[in-house]
Image (cartoon, rainbow, N blue to C red):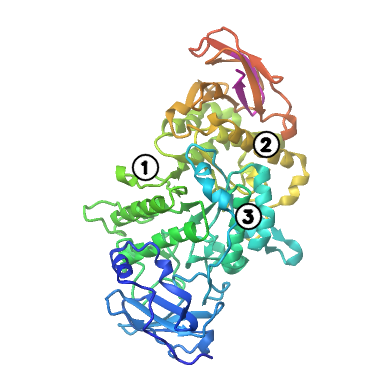
Amino acid sequence: MIEGIVKYDFTLFSEFDIYLFKEGNHFTAYEKLGSHLVEYKGLRGVYFSVWAPNAEKVFVFGDFNGWNKQSHPLSVRWDGSGIWEGFIPGIDKGTRYKYYIISKYGYSVEKGDPYAFFWETPPKTASVVWDLDYVWNDKEWMEQRYKFNSLKSPISIYEVHFGSWRRVPEERDRPLSYREMAEWLPKYVKEMGFTHVEFLPIMEHPFYGSWGYQVTGYFAPTSRYGTPQDFMYLVDILHQNGIGVILDWVPSHFPDDAHGLSFFDGTYLYEHQDPKKGYHPHWHSYIFNYGRNEVRNFLISSALFWLDKYHVDGLRVDAVASMLYLDYGRQRGEWIPNKYGGKENLEAIEFLRSLNSAVYDKFPDTQTIAEESTAWPLVSRPAYLGGLGFGMKWNMGWMHDTLSYFSKDPIYRKYHQSQLTFSIWYAFTENFILPLSHDEVVYGKGSLINKMPGDYWQKFANLRLLLGYMYAHPGKKLLFMGGEFAQWDEWYHEKSLDWHILQFPMHEGMKRWVKDLNNLYKSESALYELDFEPAGFEWIDFSDTEQSVISFIRKGKLYREMVLVVCNFTPVPRYNYRIGVPSEGYWREILNSDAKEYGGTGTGNLGGVYSEQIIMHNRPFSVSLTLPPLGILFFKLNT
């Protein structure tokens, strides 16, 4: 046990640090606050610092003092910052600790460290002294990633919940560790042709059933699967295999666990005091006070931390809509209008703009992505133009409309074709990602394959058509794990994906289809280069509702790189189906969802068709095609 020695003549803070902290612009606060292994006057130990402006006293207690709450007091700084600090010699890496805080108002609380780099494995709740030392081997990726993260590059994201992607049945069905995942995931993602992995929140969270969306450790990967260095190793290996890493990040709310941020120094510090602004009725969690400078420091520092220390390539910001609207999830009388009488959360808007400006200033080769479900304008436009400053935004409208359309029996689809084609009217108003995400395959919504109507064969054909349509539609791509091989069961976070079903030909065929879609997508610039520009898309015909057929052209910067796409949304094959094309020549069939290797009937065009000088769809040339049942065809002009 270390005696009650705390040295107060050592600090990591300069006067400039305190100035930035007070004004809300200290975006590397993780280098100062929290616990840091240091050497001072020949003594090795730990420097502790914590923001608790309404505290009367603050103590550190843990392994080193037998968990004696009041033997090691910290000292409050003289500068009015509300920061308590102290250096305790003799403490080493791996030491567990907490803060014991007595507020000015008589309350006492025991808290984990908001800036801790590591935590005990839940349900234990102590913070752990740790370092972030690691030798990275991803230099080549880091130097080139601006190309892979560019809005003009192919981005196909494989969305993963870490604890349920694959488990070890021989060991009580435990999840893989970070290092075990580094053996399996990079090879699989590379084989399948995805460009990026997106992890549901990997930050420390007490309740596993929250999927990580109730965060307590905003600077720590969850210890359920290993150490910070273990997670760094996973990111490193993904990068060495040419795969980008995106993390879900949750600045919209935080849980009410006693050891977390809520009521942190005996007052409502990180959250608003008034529950009409500070408590989320849907998720029973607290809402950050975005108007408080120190809270903005905390959140923006967390975002930059993952990009800095973990080499992460992007952040998908969860539940942005809940941040933008003061009345989100509330009835009349349950929310407080802004100073202009409106429902817009002005402080959250300013926070998001500051967040994105800071990210793109410090890490211009990364991306921020908004999960925003409303029609809020300019989400993915720069802050200096009045936008929120995100790089991209999930297209929730496309997702809901498309899944609704596909769930209908094909006999009724002719009455709903506008539901399918409507997305093109707004496709270029934002930089959209097309998500088929985890939220759509849980809580009774059914897996993707089970959403599809028809018999066994038609379900698979419909899903191949859905995925092909997503890859053909303007926008980057996201697919949640299990969808790539048509898992029947809904996703459940407590068990592995059903990998065993790949022994069946139709599931193996679906996996092969997604692999070939990814490879086609990456090889054809017309499918990604002008994703966010109207010049990248041209309808041929969207009006054949009677036969439920649509056709369009995807275009890149080079005219000869265009790709023709034709979709038949009924189980009836169409023979001698004529569509207009913009150019004369041989249109080679480069991908067909009905090919036998995918589980289809093999109906197609024998490799391609020559155009004829027959006017159709206001074009001087046309082709006569065979359209497979519930199929999508991709053609490219041979030049």
Up the image or down, 71 lies above or below 488; here it is: below
Q: Are marks 2 and 1 in contact (CB under 8 Å)?
A: no
Q: Is residue 333 left or right of residue 464?
A: left
Please state the horizontal and vertical placement of residue 406, each as a whole percent of the image.
57, 35
Disc 2 marks which residue? 513
Tell me, yes or no, whether the highlighted magenta stretch contains residue 632.
yes
Please state the horizontal and vertical placement of residue 303, each as a whole percent of the image.
44, 58
Q: Quick one: label 2 or label 1, which is nearer the N terminus?
A: 1
Please state the horizontal and vertical placement of residue 383, each as a whole percent of the image.
33, 46
Q: At numbered mark 3, what does the secondary structure look like: helix, strand or loop?
A: helix
Mark 3, Cα crowd under 10 Å, few <14 / some 14-19 / many 20+, is many
Q: At numbered mark 2, what does the secondary structure look like: helix, strand or loop?
A: helix
Up the image or down, 459 lies above or below 93; here it is: above
Query: Could you tell me how far apart the alpha carbons at marks 3 and 2 are, in whole angstroms?
Result: 26 Å
Q: Quick one: label 1 or label 3, which is nearer the N terminus?
A: 3
Q: Is residue 548 left or right of residue 334?
A: right
Disc 3 marks which residue? 237
Q: Nearer the viewer, mark 3 or mark 2?
A: 3
Q: Quadrant of residue 95?
A: bottom right
Magenta residues span 623-639
Query: Could you tell me which quadrant the N terminus lies in?
Result: bottom right
Query: Which is the main secondary structure of the residues drawn in magenta?
Result: strand
Q: Are marks 3 and 2 in contact (CB under 8 Å)?
A: no
Disc 1 marks which residue? 381
Q: Is residue 386 left or right of residue 374?
A: left
Q: Looking at the picture, which amino acid does disc 2 mark?
A: Trp
Residue found at x 44% / y 73%? 34
